[in-house]
Image (tube, grey):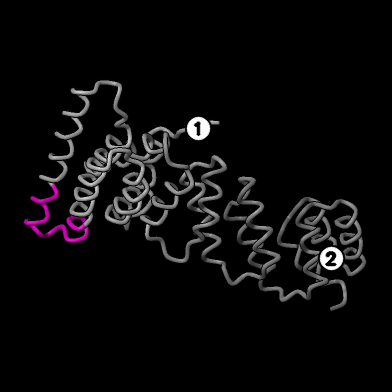
Amino acid sequence: MRQQRHPASWWDQFQQASEKFDLGILTEGLGDEIVPKIPSPLLRREAEIALDVQVRHLNKPASEELAERARKGVERLISTVARLQERSGDGFELREAHALIHLLEGKTGEAAHEAEEFVKTQPILRCFVSALRLERFDTNLAVKLLAAGQDPAVALHSGQVIGKYAWWPSWLLKVVTERALAGRLDQETVAALDRCAYAELSPAQARIARRLLDGEEALIDASAVRLEGLGEADSAEKLRNGDLTTVALAARLIPI
């Protein structure tokens, strides 16, 4: 089964998502995925040379020598592909070379779109996410969300949230990951869950909190009744209405 391909405009969103976007990291990573797929050994070798010098140029943009060598390398690859296309027509497979040329020309969205024809989406996603150079970032979650179809802006925000709160207990990280996958991770939810993280719940209390967060109606009602018995009528009402800030309070009512 052929995988669904994302349009170039979808891939272009990544470069807009971070001021630290590193074109050198992306070019090297995605180039390493594309080049081995080029079937012709001679063309593959020329592609390797063009990719190598282009990556070196991107890592040292001030070098005029590298800039000139990179330009000539790309031009030579384009000419070679054009000659092969003219001689062989449609009988010679050149999609991989075309994808690499777009990458070397800085057309990253088009390169990724074409590469999805012969490279799995997930490795391509990892190349783009790595190029963002985001600190305190959960790459695995972001890639999982992107692969599940979420827009880059939403998925990358969730990756930053989880990276920022990596110190949260494992049970709470599981909750927040599930909410992110379901597209229900907004700032209000994060703030409420952060209060749960600070509550220092025992394992038993954490299990109760997780069930409350999952919306278990019978447990919510029983916890609300207990809160009312302690004179916390407002908190009981909030808990019944789905307010996450009261979850930690309700969970702590059971003995440690």
Q: Position of residue 195 (x, y in %)?
A: 66, 68
- Pick the quarter of the image with the C terminus: bottom right
Instruction: Tell me the quarter of the picture where residue 66 sits.
Output: bottom left
Which part of the image, by quadrant, shows the N terminus?
Answer: top right
Seen from the viewer's position, the closer of residues 93 and 176 is 93
> What are the residue bounds of the magenta stretch?
56-70
Q: Which residue carries the number 1 mark?
A: 4
Q: Secondary structure under badge 2?
A: loop
Above or below, 212 against 7 in this view is below
Residue at mark 2: 232
- The image shows residue 252 at horizontal and vertical percentages of 81, 72
Kind of residue indicated by mark 2? Glu
Residue type for callout 1: Gln
Residue depicted at x 41% and y 32%: 7
Element marked by disc 1 = loop
**Between 167 and 120, the one nearer to me in the picture:** 120
Task: Where is residue 64? Give x, y as percent.
Answer: 7, 56
Answer above or below: position of 91 versus 172.
Answer: above
Q: Which mark is residue 135?
A: none
